[in-house]
Amino acid sequence: MTSLVLLVWAAAVAALARPALTGGWTTSLPRLTVGLWLGAELSVSVAVLTAGLLVAVPPAALAAGLEGIVVACTRALTGLGAPNETLAVIGLLATVVLAARIVISLIVTFTSARRWRRRHLAALLPLGRPDANGWTVVDHTTAAVYCLPGRPGRVVVTSAALDALTAEELAAVLRHERAHLRGRHHLLVALAVAFHRALPGLPMADAAETEIRRLVEHLADDRASERHGRQAVATAIVQLADRAPRHALGAGTGAVERVRRMLAPPARPRTLHRLVAASAVGLLLTGPPAVAIASAGLALQAATCPTDSPPAAGSPAHVAGS
């Protein structure tokens, strides 16, 4: 029963996340919306993994700790062939496969991105020259500004971008890129990419990657506009439209929507809206564990405090039956 509840939870979150988190309101709450997307992905993953585990490990065995889990899994494997044990083994194997896909996707995503950035940086260093302000200038005919996350992070500016941007626009773009580096936005994008890689057929996974890429640009735009104004950010975006390499976060990515947002900013969200969004993140993160823990607790209570125990001597029921 608990596994069914968790699977229904996962299906509901996966089905509702895309329509609920792609509306126009998300541009006014980019940080919390990113949290909602990542919370939804984690909630679905935990719910499905826990549901598969509970098929093989009943809540009563789960409440008994590691020993109970091992005993339940051993019983299922040794009794393979009986309907219940076969279903338990299928659930256990499905859980292991899904967990392995998620872990492998995380490893592949992070290592491939890091490897690409190192190669890109190694190719840039002989061509680039450091600026006194901490960024790297590369002679190139394409106007581009982007950052390469890592330790240390690096902002790359082409010579064409220096010629195309005014001093205020350049300052806004540099603040935009530094906001990416300070906020570790590449990690947020990588988590969404890994989830999509693990579950490529899930529409929610595709939408999450697209939306998180979009929202981190809004976060960086907001940081830049705080000091340099929305007009400077908007004109800089136009000059640098969509000219960043992959695995890098560029100031010109998703230009059209970002320019519109800078020139016609969304209404400031109310405190109530922030509280609702934050509460939803908390619910997504705590929902599946709470269901599993509650189920295990009820099973443990039933095992230690049975309700059908015989009445004690001297009780009214005992006296009446004597």
Image (tube, grey):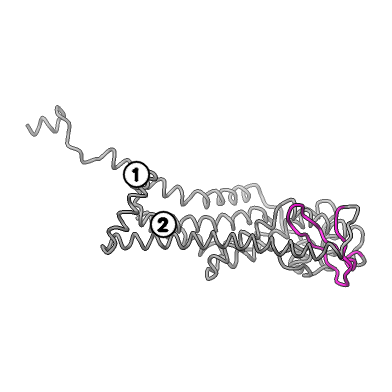
- Locate the C terminus and report the quarter of the image it occupies: top left
Percent coordinates x, y for residue 288 in the rendering: 46, 52
**21 lies left or right of 129:** left
Percent coordinates x, y for residue 28 in the rendering: 69, 56
* Residue 137 in magenta stretch: yes
Badge 2 element? helix
Of labels 1 and 2, earlier in sequence is 2
Q: Amino acid at mark 2?
A: Ala
Label disc, if present, on residue 190 of the rendered structure: none
Percent coordinates x, y for residue 184 in the rendering: 70, 53
Determine which quarter of the picture holds residue 162: bottom right
Label disc, if present, on residue 298 of the rendered structure: 1
Q: Residue furthest top?
A: 314
Badge 1 element? helix
> How busy is the neighbourhood of tag 1: few (under 14 within 10 Å), some, or many (20 plus)?
some
Q: Amino acid at mark 1?
A: Leu
* Residue 281 in magenta stretch: no
Mark 1 or 2: in front is 2
- Mark 2 = which residue? 51
Q: Are marks 1 and 2 in contact (CB under 8 Å)?
A: no
- Locate the N terminus and report the quarter of the image it occupies: bottom left
Determine which quarter of the picture holds residue 114: bottom right
Please say whether residue 19 is visible from this viewpoint.
Answer: no
Above or below residue 173? Residue 305 is above
Rendered residue at 74%/61% (across/down)? 118
Rendered residue at 29%/62% (across/down)? 80
Determine which quarter of the picture holds residue 160: bottom right
Q: Which residues are magenta?
A: 134-162
Percent coordinates x, y for residue 9 in the rendering: 45, 58
